[in-house]
Image (cartoon, grey):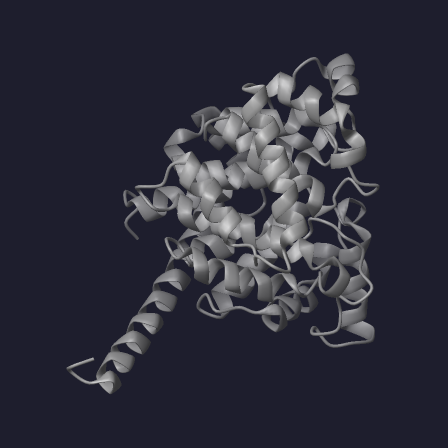
Amino acid sequence: MNTNSTFYQKTVGCLVGGLIGDAIGTPTEGMDYEQIEARFGWVDDFDCDGTDDTVMKVLLAEALIRTDGEANYDDWAQVWLDQWHDIFGDKVGKFFQSVLHTAAKLKHHGTPRMAALGNMPSSSSAMCISPIGIVNACNPQAAANQAYSVASLIHTHDVSFCQDGAAAMATAVSHAFDPSATVGSILETAVQAITPISGQEMLGLIDEVLNIAEQAGEYAQFRADIYAQRDRFFRPLICDSRETIPITLAIFKLADGDFEKTVTYGANFGRDADTIATMGGAIAGAYQGINGIRSDWVTKANDLTQVNQAELAEKLIVAAKKKFDTQTKSRETFRSILGRDS
C-alpha cells in the first residue's frame, strides 16, 4: 500500500476526520448554542471515540469491503445482522430509534427492501455514508446512485428526502478526492447529486441556507441568523436530514474547507452537533487529506478508537481498486461491441 499516495492520504483523512467530528460534537448534541456558550464557552477538543455515527460508518465500510465496493441495502443489512453487538452494545443508547427499529425488523420480521417503511426522518444514513464516497472516489454520479440504494435500508417513501441527504454527502466526499476540487465545486456537486424533481424540498432548503451563509459572511452571524428562523429551518427531530444537510454544507462553506473550523463550527452549532460535525469532518478530511488535520488530534483519535482507521482505509482502498477494475473491464467490453467506427 502506497501510504504517500493522494488516494491514501485523503481516505485516511476522510475516516479520521469523520471520527473526530463525531467525537468533538458529542458533548454538545441536543443543546442550543446559547447553552453551549454558557456551559463550555467554545468547544475545541474531544475526549471520546464518537457515537452511533462512527459505529454505523464502520458497518457500512465492512459491507463495501465484503463486496469489493459494490454494496447495496441487502449487503449492509447482512452486516447489521452479523455484527449485531456493534449496534446493541455499549453505545446502544446513542442510536436513533429508526436504526434500532430497522435492525429489529431485519432480524425478526421483514426483508431489507421493506425494513425502512414507517421509519421517522433522521440522518442515520447520511451521517455514515462517507465510505461510499471513498470507493467511488472522483466518480460523483456513481457515489450518488449507490448512496440512494444503500440509504433505502433506513429511509424510503415519505422520508426519502433522507436519501437525498445521503447522496449529497457521499457525492461531496467523492468529489473531494479530485485534486482539482474546490469548496465551491464540492458544494455544487453535492447539490447536483440530488434528484431534481423528487428532491425539490431538500434542494430548496440547501439553497436557502447557503444563501444565508453567503449573506452572513461568517460563522457566528450565520448561526444567529439560522436560530432566528428556527421555525423555518429546525425540525421537531433534530436529526432530520432536512435540518442537518443544509447546515453541514453551509458550515463547510463558511469554514472554506478548513478541517478544524468545519468540525468546531459543527460542534458549537448545537442541535444534532455530532452528526453535523462528522459529516462536515468527513468532507473536509477528504478535501484536505490527513495532513490537513492537526497531528495531536490524529494521535488522540487513533488512541481512543477501537477500530484502526489506517487499516480500515487500506481495506477500503483495495475495495475501490477492485471496483474500478471491474468498471474498466465493463467499459472495454462495451467499446468492443460498439465497433471501431462508433
Question: In this image, 289 relative to 197: left or right?
Answer: left
Nearer the observer, 249 or 275? 249
Residue 181: x %, y % from top left = 36, 41
Q: In the picture, residue 245 is in which quadrant?
A: top right
- List the single residue furthest toward the left: 340
Taking the image as shown, residue 216 lies to the left or right of residue 28, namely left
State the residue at coordinates (70%, 13%).
41
Image vertical order of residue 243 relative to residue 118, above or below: above
Residue at 63% x, 36% y: name it. 208
**Residue 141 occupies which quadrant of the picture?**
bottom left
x, y percent for residue 186: 44, 42
Frontmost residue, 217 versus 142: 217
Q: Residue placed at 62% from the left, 39% from the top?
A: 246
Q: Position of residue 5 (x, y in %)?
A: 28, 45
Q: Measured along the vertical axis of the image, is residue 224 above or below residue 257?
A: above
- The residue under the point 19% across, 85% down is 339
Q: Is residue 152 above or below residue 202?
A: below
Q: Whole-percent x and y of residue 28?
A: 73, 28
One can see residue 54 in this view: no
Q: How many marks?
A: 0
Residue nearer the viewer, 120 or 58: 120
State the residue in front, 201 or 56. Answer: 201
Image quadrant occupied by the C terminus: bottom left
Q: Is residue 34 visible?
A: yes
Q: Is residue 252 above or below residue 162?
A: above
